[in-house]
């Protein structure tokens, strides 16, 4: 068990407008490599924000300030044991390659509420984009600049 130190914001890296299901995420992350997955024991995210703004839980947690072993997700190598991970569906232009902030108005509203709630409950935890922890474009927007626009100064 580790102390909860951060919330990491991700995108699914799927083209704008493409729906993604929990089953898709589970397959991409936990199916064997030979079957098109990554072969992980657990998915990479605690929660997913659909294009409609609906937040869906992927991995249960007890909502406390610790990350128990059964709550660990595989969102960012080297940081998982002390992080929670939230993903929004999208993050890539329609060409399927170019990073793009594709958040719908509903996703933006849901992510803002999610982050504000997280920050209120865990004010000492950092809120970062996946790109702050790894050489990736994910989540395809500047999380620190966005946090300032919503009044969360992390």
Image (tube, rainbow, N blue to C red):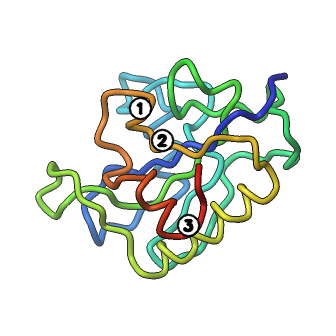
Residue at image mark 1: 37
Residue at image position (53%, 34%) is 75
**Are the two marked residues, 2 and 3, in contact with CB atoms closer than 8 angstroms?**
no
Closer mark to the observer between disc 2 and disc 3: 3
56 above or below 96?
below
**Relative image position of residue 117 (x, y in whole percent):** 73, 64
Q: Earlier in the sequence, mark 2 or mark 3?
A: 2
101 above or below 13?
below
15 above or below 127?
below
- Toward the left, the furthest residue is 95
**Relative image position of residue 44 (x, y in whole percent):** 55, 37
Q: Residues within 10 Å of mark 1 (few under 14, many from 20)?
A: some
Q: Earlier in the sequence, mark 2 or mark 1?
A: 2
Near-viewer residue (56 or 140): 140
Q: Is residue 7 left or right of residue 10?
A: right
> Cα distance, mark 2 to mark 3?
24 Å
Could you tell me which quadrant the N terminus lies in? top right
Residue at image mark 2: 27
> Cα distance, mark 1 to mark 3?
27 Å
**Relative image position of residue 38 (x, y in whole percent):** 43, 27
The local secondary structure at tag 2 comes to: helix
Residue at image mark 3: 111
């Amino acid at each position: 068990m580790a102390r909860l130190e951060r919330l990491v914001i991700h995108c699914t890296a799927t083209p704008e407008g493409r729906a993604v299901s929990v089953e898709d995420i589970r397959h991409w992350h936990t199916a064997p490599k030979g079957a098109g997955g990554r072969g992980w024991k657990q998915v990479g995210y605690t929660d997913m924000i659909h294009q409609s703004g609906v937040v869906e839980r992927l991995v249960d947690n007890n909502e406390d300030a610790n990350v128990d072993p059964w709550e660990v997700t595989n969102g960012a190598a080297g940081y998982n044991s002390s992080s929670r991970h939230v993903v929004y569906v999208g993050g890539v232009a329609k060409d399927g390659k170019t990073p793009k902030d594709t958040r719908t108005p509903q996703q933006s509203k849901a992510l803002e509420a999610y982050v504000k709630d997280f920050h209120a409950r865990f004010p000492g935890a950092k809120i970062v984009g996946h790109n702050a922890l790894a050489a990736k474009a994910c989540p395809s927007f500047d999380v620190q600049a966005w946090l300032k626009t919503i009044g969360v100064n992390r």
